[in-house]
Image (cartoon, coloured by chain):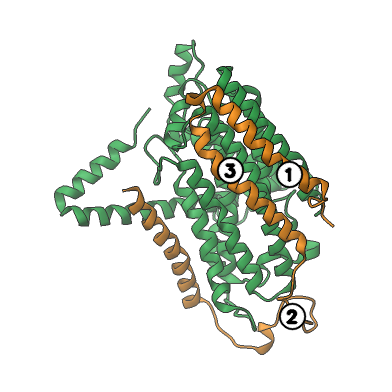
Amino acid sequence: MNYILLFTMILASLFLVFAGMMTASLISPRSYNKQKGETYECGIPTQGATWVHFRAGYYLFSILFLMFDIETVFLFPWATIVQELGFKALMGILFFLFILVLGLAYAWRKKALEWK
Amino acid sequence: MFDFTTITTAIDQFLRSMMPAQFAIIVECILVAACALLAYVMFAIVMIFMERKVCAAFQCRLGPMRVGPWGLLQVFADVFKMLIKEIISINRSDSFLYRLAPYLVVMSSVLTFCCLPFAKGLQVLDFNMGVFFLMATSSFGVLGILLAGWSSNNKFSMIGAMRSGAQMISYELSIGLCMLTVVTLSGTMQISELVEQQHDAWFIFKGHLPAMLAFVIYLIAGNAETNRAPFDLPEAESELTAGFHTEYSGMHFGFFYVAEFMNLFIVAAIASTLFLGGWMPLHISGFDTFNMVMDYIPGIVWFLGKTFFIIWVLMWFRWTFPRLRIDQVPTLEWKYLVPIGLVNLLIMTVCVVMGWTF
């Protein structure tokens, strides 16, 4: 039943946006003007392409994010059974976090966490 | 506490007596979807009105007063105005992705909204790995934001979306770590069970120091996740026009606006569910009379009370703290919040293993 509801809610959210856009396009005015479609930047015609190579700093942060997010995925099942495992859970997490913090310390040392 | 499942089972049985089982399920799905969407839109309207009034109060103004008593109808007027605004299609945009972006943003916030426990039994999606599902759904909204910035062929949008994406994925880690801290304490990921476990004391009291630290980190990270001041760099008005939704007009923009406000509501609601007991009344073990008096207040009032209190605190943040510089945003996350979150998780594990919780 949960999965049927999940599917329903996905459809419903799509419907919400679709219905809103349809209503707006039905009752809103339409007028065509070549200037209207220009990019809203500085008033003068836009210079150069927008879709260019972007700086690598963002890429570094997304790699770091990937590392830590996968870690979160691994830790969630562990977190549910800490109370049953007891002391063993503590040893496990210490070892796991040690390797993880090593990665963070490496990134820190290499100045990957600075915004340049 | 009043259990809302009595109402839903009554409706279910009534529908099953009227028609075959498959039709009953379809009708129920439509009913649930209609109610959830209605609640979603109503909360968005309440939030926008509240934002204006709270903002006005902090600046010693009255806020909207003209349309309706105390300006109550102002937001409805604004929604109508937004509907009759022209939707401008821009030249040289990637038009498929440009149209897709609001769908993704709204879908993410609607699905997260459905996981919230408003009262006992009043919850649309209740998975056994609910907290994990919550993280998953709330994090793919960033995809819509990146698409919006990329596809609209505008340098301001592009920079705004990139900043927004970097900020949101960074601060999501802290949110994940704070949720992990709570899951470690409770030993379950199902949201309804998380709330049930707080019947003797809320998690913020049960987990004492680590839980309080996690709550504070969650508020900071949640504020950054919603792209609100003091973390509103992605749409810093003097530098980037309006950030990733610069090129959106009319109802297109309206959906981004609604999703942004609902994300604030969702962040506050998750904070109140995980740390402040959700719909569970304030119980102090040993004070039976006090607990009984508290039980008379319905669960939904407790839930909304806590949620709107946290929303009010977040709005207070907005008008109190100056905006961060762009180089301070990753520093705050990676050099302070993540290490503190990891150590906090470790402290919580030690507390749980040693039995040092209330």
**Residue B342's x, y, as percent?**
67, 35
| In the image, farthest residue toward the right | A116
B46 vs B251: above or below: above
Q: Could you tell me which chain the residue with mark 3 belongs to?
A: A
Amino acid type shown at disc 2: Ala
| In the image, farthest residue toward the top | B286
Q: Could you tell me which chain the residue with mark 1 belongs to?
A: A
Residue A37 is left or right of residue B194, and the answer is right
Give the green chain's letter. B
* Residue on which the image places disc 1: A104
Determine the residue positioned at 75% across, 48% down: B230
Amino acid type shown at disc 1: Leu
Separation (CA) of disc 2 from disc 1: 36 Å
Determine the residue positioned at 57% across, 53% down: B139
Q: Given this view, does label 3 or label 2 mark the residue nearer the observer?
A: 3
Separation (CA) of disc 1 from disc 3: 14 Å
Amino acid type shown at disc 3: Thr
Residue A21 is left or right of residue B247, and the answer is left
